[in-house]
Amino acid sequence: MDEGANEAAAPEVPTAAGRVVDRLAEAVEEIAGISDYRNAYKKQFCNLSRRIKLLAPMFEELKESKDPISKPAVGALEKLNRALDSAKDLLRLGSEGSKIFLVLERDRIMEMFQVVTFQLEQALDKIPFDEIDISDEVKEQVELVHSQFKRAKERIDATDTELHTDLLSVYNMSADAKVDSTILQSLAEKLQLMTISDLKQESIALHEMVVSSGGDPGKVIEKMVMLLKKVKDFVQTQQSEMGTPANPRVLPSHGTTKTPIIPDDFRCPISLELMGDPVIVSTGQTYERGYIKKWLEAGHNTCPKTQQKLSSTSLTPNYVLRSLIMRWCEENGMEPPKRPAQTGKPPSGCSASEHAKVVDLLHKLSSQNLEDQRSAAGELRLLAKRNADNRACIAEAGAIPVLVSLLVTHDIRTQEHAVTALLNLSIFEENKGKIIVSGAVPGIVHVLKRGSMEARENAAATLFSLSVVDRNKVIIGESGAIPPLVLLLSEGSQRGKKDAATALFNLCIYQGNKGKAVRAGVIQTLMGLLTDPEASMMDEALAIMAILSSHPEGKAAITAAEALPVLIKVIRSGSPRNKENAAAVLVHLCNGEQQQQHLAELQEQGMMEPLFAMVESGTDRGKRKAAQLLERMNRFLDQQKEAHVQAKAQTRARIQGLMDEPRDTTTSASTDT
């Protein structure tokens, strides 16, 4: 067999540069998966994690790039990889470590923050951005992160001094010393040790951390366990006074030999008992009405589970959860918990009559009667369209999960009402998170793929509304939403195309979604819109193309689609905004493998004059892009001139060499004879 064939068949061995980029991407992915940071340093941990996650697009582009990475750049990336490993260890400590240990070791933890911040800043400072193949947008983002780390290393964020002082004072007390209940209350709340589950988790984390910390773990464990016991005794005493049973996890068996395990979501976070009258507080958490009322009546203004301050003390019945609990009890042969008689107060910003109407509609929405579901979904759709107070009231009443469940219904009209109601609810900023948490995205994508045209268009508009929040761009992109959005952009009505275009534009701001859009065929669709005078989609199509042209796959697809003549036409006669986006696409095209070909074509088409006009009178961004293009065209012309001069000189030298060659006298003499 031919040796070349053997070499071609062999798997590609990753280079040193490829391996370090892979490790960097994996490190950021692992860091993105770390969450639930301990309260004492939540701000610092979240800031560190957020800044690191902003580096992900750089590694994605480097993985996709075909250009080799220089040795100095590889060395700088290796240094960054070591810094990310240190950051990962610190963030894991902040997520999984003992809350008590972290507060007591305040100085050590703050020193670790300073060291990690310094390492990251120094590593980013050494990266030669001119020698690596990343887009201008990503470079600007990384430079912003670098400047944030630079500022962060020069200051120390203040921690809760009172928490540290109180914890230290109890830590240094003897085992039988009496502690002020006010201090224990403060410690339990600030450390988020308000339930048996929290205390058990802290006990495990405390032992694991202290054992691995070195020093004298025996004595340290003894003192910290003593401290934890004081907090635990206080919490249990408080719960007992509020009516919590001594062993809240043991429920009556009703004569059966085996008690089914109650799902955690069905338990009240305060009592750990099965809820009979679940209500939602302003933070979105659900509690048994009796226990949360006692908590509030005791003077607390925070959510027991999250410790967030409550914006109001209103309690909204969670009808959906109660229905699920009743069904679970029936399936497991258990008597459902009694629901005390009560008159619910309407949520803030919603009148009593409106609240009563929403409650009635939710009962219909949760029924098995198709006509009731359809009419209730339609009325909720109209109510949510009316004003912000209605949107808050409907969401607080627990309508979102029920509407989400109707997204997969076979009844076309009910599905249209449900997705449009979610669209209207999503306009209210606080509802965006609730819709995402309810698991709505797969259902919305289902509607986008299989619903009626009206439902598909409203599904696209809903995805646009939700994608305003950056983290939602990732969730929606991974849900498979992009291909059906591209299809809607191609075959939808005028409104549907615009809804799809706005959703795609927003999603493609996130670097990881750009390749998905290109692979879904969006460039061909955009070209169709650009060349169809009746489409009236020039603005949207150019805006999406400009954002995709920074991606290697986008650049290749635009080149393959022969977009240059269309872009040149826009530069000559388009609107200022369209000229700006067309110039942005051309800047990226003239910075790749085929830049010489593109620059030559621009030169042949006489683009100097239109670009000079843009520099004079275009938009601010358009002026910058036009100036970049002119600079590259001038550089190209200089190179062409230099090449021409060299070729001319070489030709002259060859002619001169031929003229200077001696004649063959032997041949001449024989010819004369």
Image (spheres, rainbow, N blue to C red):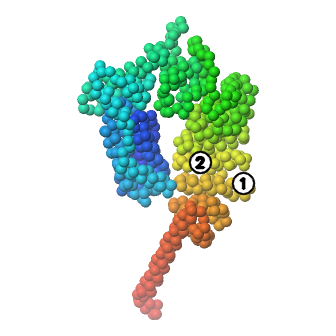
Query: What secondary structure is found at the residue carrying circle 2?
Result: helix
Name the foreground residue: 214 vs 387.
387
Nearer the camera: disc 2 or disc 1:
2
Location of mark 1 (residue) = 535
Q: Position of residue 249 (x, y in %)?
A: 47, 16
- Residue drawn 70% across the image and 46% down it: 496
Sequence order check, earlier mark of 2 and 1: 2
Q: Is residue 237 visible?
A: yes
Which quarter of the figure is the C terminus placed in? bottom left
The residue at the far top in this view is: 255
CA separation, marks 2 and 1?
Answer: 21 Å
- Residue drawn 69% across the image and 42% down it: 457
- Residue drawn 38% across the image and 41% down it: 158
Query: With 437 as the anchor, is 352 left or right in this view?
Result: right
Q: Is residue 408 above or below residue 470?
A: above
Q: Dividing the picture into quarters, in which one does residue 229 lie?
A: top left
Q: Position of residue 320 (x, y in %)?
A: 62, 25
Query: What secondary structure is found at the residue carrying circle 1?
Result: loop
- Residue drawn 47% across the image and 55% down it: 140
Name the foreground residue: 30 vs 391.
391
Residue type at numbered disc 1: Ala
Q: Position of residue 310 (x, y in %)?
A: 52, 32
Location of mark 2 (residue) = 506
Residue type at numbered disc 2: Asn
Name the foreground residue: 14 vs 179.
179
Query: Which circle marks residue 256 in the picture?
Result: none
Q: Is residue 564 above or below residue 300?
A: below
Q: Around disc 1, counting alpha carbons within 10 Å, would you say few (fewer than 14), some (14 to 19), or many (20 or more)?
A: few
Q: Position of residue 226 (x, y in %)?
A: 31, 23
Q: Is residue 406 visible?
A: no
Q: Is residue 36 above or below residue 12?
A: above
Q: Is residue 323 above or below residue 425?
A: above
